[in-house]
Image (tube, rainbow, N blue to C red):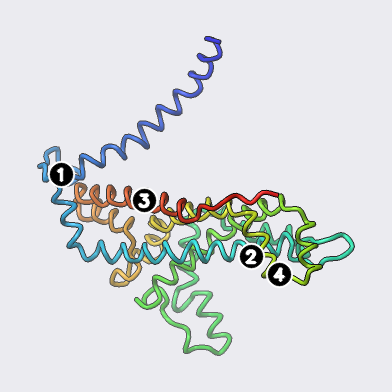
Amino acid sequence: MRGKRLFIAVFLLPPLLLYGIFVVSPYAQAFPIAGTNWSGLSPTYDFVGLDNFARLLDDGYFWTALRHNGLLLVLLPVATIVLGLFFASMISVGGRADRVGVHGVRGAGFYRVVYFFPQVLSVAIIGVLWKQMYAPNTGLINGFLRGAGLDGLAVAWLGDPRFAFWCVLAVLVWMNVGFYVVLFGAAMQSIPRDLYEAALLDGANRLTTLVRITVPLVWDTIQVAWVYLAIIAIDGFAIVQIVTDGGPSSSSDVVGLRLYKTAFADGQFGYASAIGVAMFFLTLTVAVMFLRVTRRERVEL
């Protein structure tokens, strides 16, 4: 027994130690730093108490960024989950019923690869790719619009405050929906096809079977997806920083990018840490809230 414990300790302690040093320690250090006016480079600093948190209440840039995160928190999970369920349903049980029974559409394997493809690309590549697609003169989107004779709709998508945020939202949905198509599709494989066949015999259409059969039986998976997407919505730093850098005029700014600029551009690490601490508690609250709101009785077969 002692040899077994020693064996486990040898393999567990090094990764736990590294995790504690490089992940837990920076998080823990943010709390005391949030109560100072540290610039990030100076060896000296003053303790300012809760002044940094009081400053948040009057920071217009912070509240603008937080409002954008709030919109992402509402729209990103809903759009991604709805599209993911629809595509997964079509791939798994969207084909016409025949002698074999209910099955997916023709070419389901190909569609799974296509939908999952964004997951093999890094965030940096996705950001640069879409930034070029949105380019006003050479971008694929405006090129398509001009080719279709819709020159009036070809605008500077990332340069117009009316569209910049929605362009970022579209990228976030595109880059995440494929993963949840595969995730929901895997969950649907455990649902007996007899249920779908019985529903079709009773005259139920595809939408009814999706809402009344599929969703209740994969609800646990949907709940997990909702929490993960909520965390992505609260962050959103990488894509926003690459595609729009928060502009124009902070029209697509998010809290993660505001924190980054406050620390590394303005040299206010104390205030940036206060933003990080506030977002830590906000993320924790949202995760708990989503788990409670979406909690329901498990449907068993």
Which numbered disc, 4 or 3, marks the residue that appears first in the sequence? 4
Q: What residue sits right under mark 2 in the picture?
A: 211
Q: Secondary structure at mark 3?
A: helix
Residue at the (68%, 60%) spot, across then down? 213
Q: Looking at the image, which residue sits at the far front?
A: 297
Q: Are marks 4 and 3 in contact (CB under 8 Å)?
A: no
Nearer to us in this view, 79 or 15: 79
Please give left or right for residue 37 compared with residue 168 in the image: left
Which numbered disc, 4 or 1, marks the residue that appears first in the sequence? 1
Q: What residue sits right under mark 3 in the picture?
A: 285
Number of residues whose C-alpha sits closer than 10 Å to that of mark 3, classed few (under 14), some (14–19) or many (20 or more): few
Q: Amino acid at mark 1?
A: Thr
Residue 123, position in %: x, y?
48, 55
Gap between marks 3 and 2, in whole Å? 29 Å
Q: What residue sits right under mark 4 in the picture?
A: 206
On the image, which quarter does residue 95 sit in?
bottom right
Q: Amino acid at mark 4?
A: Arg
Residue at the (40%, 56%) spot, across then down? 238
On the image, which quarter does residue 105 sit in?
bottom right
Q: Nearer the viewer, mark 2 or mark 1?
A: 2
Gap between marks 2 and 1, in whole Å? 52 Å
Q: Nearer the viewer, mark 3 or mark 1?
A: 3
On the image, which quarter does residue 116 sit in?
bottom right
Q: Of the numbered discs in the image, which one, if any, rests on residue 36?
A: 1
Which numbered disc, 2 or 1, marks the residue that appears first in the sequence? 1
Gap between marks 3 and 1, in whole Å? 25 Å
Q: Amino acid at mark 3?
A: Thr
Q: Are marks 2 and 1 in contact (CB under 8 Å)?
A: no
